[in-house]
Amino acid sequence: MTPTTPLLTVTGLVKRFGGIVVSDRIDFDLKHGEVHALIGPNGAGKTTFINLLSGEIAPNEGRIAFDGQDITRASTSSRASMGLVRSYQVTSVVQEFTALENVMLAVQARDRRNYEFTRDVRGDASLTRPARAVLEQIGLGAKQNFRVANLAHGERRQLELGMILALQPKVMLLDEPLAGMSGLEAEEMVAFLARLKGTYGIVLVEHDMDAVFALADRVTVLVYGRSIATGSPADIQQNPAVRLAYLGDEEEEAAA
């Protein structure tokens, strides 16, 4: 598989809940090292699409291929072990553990190792060494022994991404990584994600359009579960249908 060959390919994906179609024959692809953003108004089906990619729900029709394999019916854990890993809008770290212990859990899960509950693994260098390296990578090395409950919101979001990186993903599915962040925290997160470009494929769902257009190589716009446009950030910003369906609405609200 060459760098220009899509690492993730979605063809004709359909998801219905009863009589409601929330994913309407979506075609989508992601190349190595690319950031492909997914935008659209509330209720457009963005999170449902991420759920389909991660395996949390199954499509009614269509196909998902990852790294040359059909994963349409593969489990969430199988996809994660292949390198397709998802984050959530709400942080999923363990609040009572330290930052280091949380990343150690991810390293342990990556290596599929099981330990007895009575064994203290905090001194296990095979876990602590890679965990510390990840914390340095995400800028939390100095806070490795802080309990998560004592970290700022933005730092907890950084830590969640660190846990994803500890799993050694090929593709990260990021669902609103900037949610709830202050302006400064958001700027720092955008800068961090920009450093990951070229190394990891990223499917990005985000409402912050400044962040989307700063990070994305391509953007797909969903409206009522249907893809209405895919292109570069510049193409999407200039697309009349997109401006009418989504971007134009925001501009009108800002002017009101």
Image (cartoon, grey):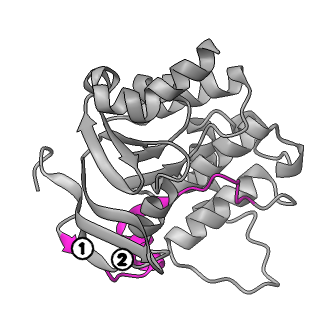
Q: Quadrant of residue 40?
A: top left
Tell me if mark 1 has few (under 14), some (14-19) or many (20+) residues whose alpha carbon lies within 10 angstroms of its own. some
Marks 1 and 2 close (CB-CB < 8 Å) = yes
Tell me if mark 2 has few (under 14), some (14-19) or many (20+) residues whose alpha carbon lies within 10 angstroms of its own. many
- Foreground residue among 170 and 42: 42
Residue where numbered disc 2 is placed: 59
Bounds of the magenta span?
Answer: 69-93
Residue at horizontal 29 percent and vertical 41 percent from the top: 33
x and y percentages locating residue 115 in the rendered image:
68, 83
Answer left or right for 30 relative to 53. left
Residue at horizontal 48 percent and vertical 81 percent from the top: 18
x and y percentages locating residue 193 in the rendered image:
48, 34
Residue where numbered disc 1 is placed: 62
- Foreground residue among 104 and 162: 162
Q: Secondary structure at mark 2?
A: loop
**Residue found at the far top of this picture:** 255
Amino acid type for the residue under numbered disc 1: Gly
x and y percentages locating residue 162 in the rendered image:
59, 48
